[in-house]
Amino acid sequence: METQSKKSTTLKLTDLKSMPIRTFWITSIAFFICFFAWFGIVPFMPDVVKDLGLTPEQKWNSIILAVTGTVFARLLIGKLCDTYGPRLCYTYLLVIGAIPVILLGFVQTPTQFLICRLFIGFIGASFVITQFHTSIMFAPNIVGTANATSAGWGNLGGGANRLGMPLIAAAVVSFGVADEIAWRYSMVIAGVIAMLMGVVYYFFTQDTPEGNFAQLKKEGRMPTIKKDEEGFMSVLKDYRVWILFVVYGASFGIELTVYGTMDDYLQNTFGISRSMAGNLVLSFALMNIFARTLGGFFGDRFGRLKGLRGRVLFLTMILAVEGVMLTIFSTTTSIAFGMIFLILFSLSVQMAEGATFSVVPFINKKAIGSISGIVGAGGNVGAFMAAMFLKSKSSVAETAALATNSNLGEEAMKAAQAAAASGAVSSGYFVIGGFVAVTALTTLAIKFSTADEKAVKEELKVELAFAAADK
């Protein structure tokens, strides 16, 4: 995608007459709604387990399936964005993706529940479209900040549902619906909201600052690749894409897994209540309001100081900090020290995510969607691998605890198993933190040519000239 005029050189959020700023708001809200619906069932899992009779194994599998579905969707949606544009892709994703969200409210068996969780995961591909859309709406000097902010505010949906979905359920109950089935109505409502957002996206955004893809192609202002498969193959052969794939797995993937297991870990390790643990995890999710933005902001700042290499160096640094913070946290036994390092981990992991997508738009300008899709999928692959790793360690520890404490009473047995699982997760966090630190070093292999550096400077010069002319 080569159109370079009329991109926004600032992130002036009140300038709603500007198409880039309007698109920023709409794509951020759409992303928020998708994440809200994707993880909307999480606050209701105790009710779901009771209603459908889920086993612990089925509960774990539902978490893994929700992440797995997103991997394939993200890989596909990036290529579709390059071909058809983000406006149509987001519209169809929201409308079609809302269907399994709504159907979740009607499931009657564990199998139906697992199938819906798999397909609901597809709306997690919304992240790729959001990153693609902001990448082509903002100039090089601000694109990292725009990407990080839209992603961070969208990710809030994954934490806001802890408050929002129970509120929706309470409203439903006030109309006379039984409390034990309010979760069903809540999921239907979340799906309808997502579907309506698809309509908003279609009518109030456009693909680029200059117009929609179809219009630009018709006017001959948007170059097309004759052999599209070769264009995609060049992306697959670019080693930098796969480094960023692993990097995003080591940041967003680890964040998903750590926060998905943190409630139980905090309770079992530090002896705090379930409500307090839930509120702590929610507060870390709310750091997305500013933490991702900081990652993109510093990525842009280092880019201005040291060029594209500066963006890579900042990504290396913040990813290493993330790994060290998680490793130290895993060894703490004091709630006070534990919270300090958990906060620092939360801050650094979200900054690393923002920093990753301050690099992505500069790998290949003609295939931003495909690259965003591959890198975004890396986050879910990382989450899947980390979840499987922690699940296996916990299962082994719990089995061993069961064998060595078979003479204890039921309550004592459960306590022994919980302690064993906590210890397994702790050692798992330590290993994962080490992996993240090692991954940080691999980012140093990402290189850009002199021509790449020059092209970015020329593009920024053009955008600044247009911005000055508009004033």
Image: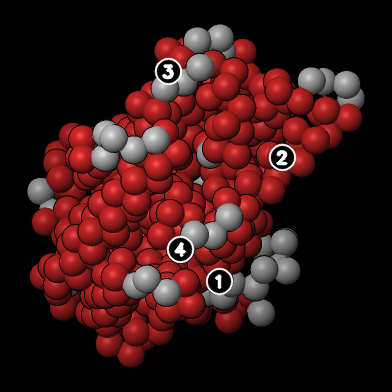
Residue bearing the label numbered 4: 270
Q: Disc 2 and disc 1: Cα gap in Å? A: 25 Å
Q: CA distance from mark 2 to mark 3?
A: 23 Å
Label 2 belongs to which residue?
A: 166
Q: In front here: 446 or 135?
A: 446
The part of the image, by quadrant, that contains residue 143 is: bottom left
* CB atoms of marks 4 and 1 within 8 Å: no
The residue carrying mark 1 is 290
Tag 2: amino acid:
Pro
Q: Are marks 3 and 1 in contact (CB under 8 Å)?
A: no
Residue with the mark numbered 3: 115
Tell me what residue is drawn at x 24 percent, y 55 percent: 428
Image spot of residue 114 (x, y percent): 43, 20
Compute the Cα span from label 3 to label 1.
Answer: 35 Å
Q: Is residue 379 left or right of residue 96?
A: left
Query: Which residue reaches farthest bottom?
Result: 305
Which residue is depicted at the point 13% across and 54% down? 238
* Residue 261 place in picture, x, y as percent: 41, 49
Q: Amino acid at mark 4?
A: Phe
The answer to which of marks 2 and 3 sits earlier in the sequence is: 3
On-image quarter of the C terminus = bottom right
Q: Earlier in the sequence, mark 4 or mark 3?
A: 3
For marks 4 and 3, give the one nearer the viewer.
Answer: 4
Q: Position of residue 285 (x, y in %)?
A: 53, 59
Mark closest to the chain's N terminus, 3 or 1: 3
The answer to whether the residue labelled 2 contacts the one labelled 3, judged by CB atoms less than 8 Å apart, is no
Which element carries disc 3, helix, strand or loop? helix
Q: Which kind of residue does numbered mark 1 sit on?
A: Phe
